[in-house]
Amino acid sequence: MTVLYEARDRIAYALEGARFAAEDALDAIRERALLVAVALGAVVIAAVVALSAGGGVGVGTEAAAERSSPTAPATAADPRPIEEADFSISMPAGWERAEPPKGASFAAESADGLATTTLWAEKAPGLDFEAFTAQSMEDLDEIGTHVRISDEVDGPSNAARITELRAEVPLDGGVDAAYHVVLRAADPYRYYLATSLQPGASTQLVADAELLGTTFRPQALPNSAE
């Protein structure tokens, strides 16, 4: 009987030990599973955060690009095209048409009154361009100083030629104003575009004067003859 009891006890101990071993193995498996689950959760969270951050950067960049991109539609600050029967010109932003002096075809002035431009058109089919330039310089000599040719564009015809003159013309009070003249032709007319800049005119007004000169385009009237 003693041997039987001892065998039974050994079996019981063996079973108990097997149970403890199984429980330990299950605990180890659960711990490893928990660790794996935590690790996977961390990976998923990191991926979500990365995707969210990436999307946010893209949206922010796109919004910043939209804010920084120039607006395509024309605004009030753009030059305004002026189209007449015998000429065209771009009016700088802030300038307005004015009443032309007697004999002039067109006039405009800046908002602050420090710059004005005036266009004269003379019907002179027999006046060649060199003579027109010389005559214009003589006229300027009578009212101003430092008269000079600042630029010239030659061409095969009068219409293709451009001469730019510069001078200093005194205003009331003896203060000199910068005077820009652009000479053009479209037979049978000779065009004299003069822009005056008073002392204190901003660099923007200087640029406006250049715009007026470079965009001025004369054109021959239909059915006009020499």
Image: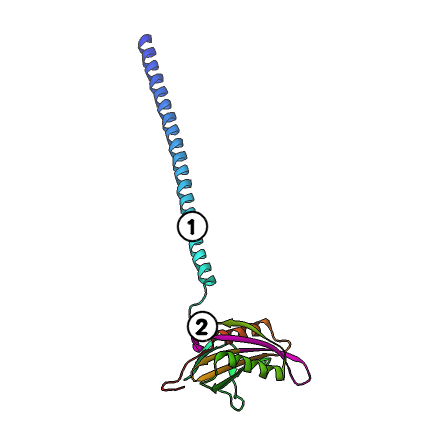
In the image, residue 168 lies in the stretch drawn in magenta: yes
Three-letter code for the amino acid on which mark 2 is drawn: Gly
Q: Is residue 129 left or right of residue 147?
A: left
Image position, residue 142 (x, y; %):
62, 84
Q: Residue at x 37, y 22 (%)?
A: 21
What's drawn in magenta, residue-wise?
A: 155-181
Front residue of 72 and 13: 72
Q: Residue at x 40, y 48 (%)?
A: 51
User: Which residue is label 2 attached to?
Assistant: 155
Q: Secondary structure at mark 2?
A: loop
Looking at the image, how many numbered discs can be counted on the residues? 2
Q: Are marks 1 and 2 in contact (CB under 8 Å)?
A: no
| Quadrant into which the N terminus falls | top left
Q: Is residue 221 visible?
A: yes
Q: Is residue 115 left or right of residue 74?
A: right
Three-letter code for the amino acid on which mark 1 is drawn: Gly
Q: Where 67 falls versus 97 (above or below)?
A: above
Image position, residue 108 (x, y; %):
52, 83
Q: Is residue 146 left or right of residue 163?
A: right
In the image, residue 208 lies in the stretch drawn in magenta: no
Q: Residue at x 51, y 75 (%)?
A: 163
| Quadrant into which the C terminus falls | bottom left
Q: Where 151 falls versus 128 (above or below)?
A: above
Residue at the right extreme, as displayed: 173
Q: Is residue 110 visible?
A: no
Q: Earlier in the sequence, mark 1 or mark 2?
A: 1
Q: Quadrant of residue 109?
A: bottom right
Q: Is residue 147 left or right of residue 50?
A: right
User: Which residue is label 1 attached to?
Assistant: 54
Front residue of 167 and 3: 167
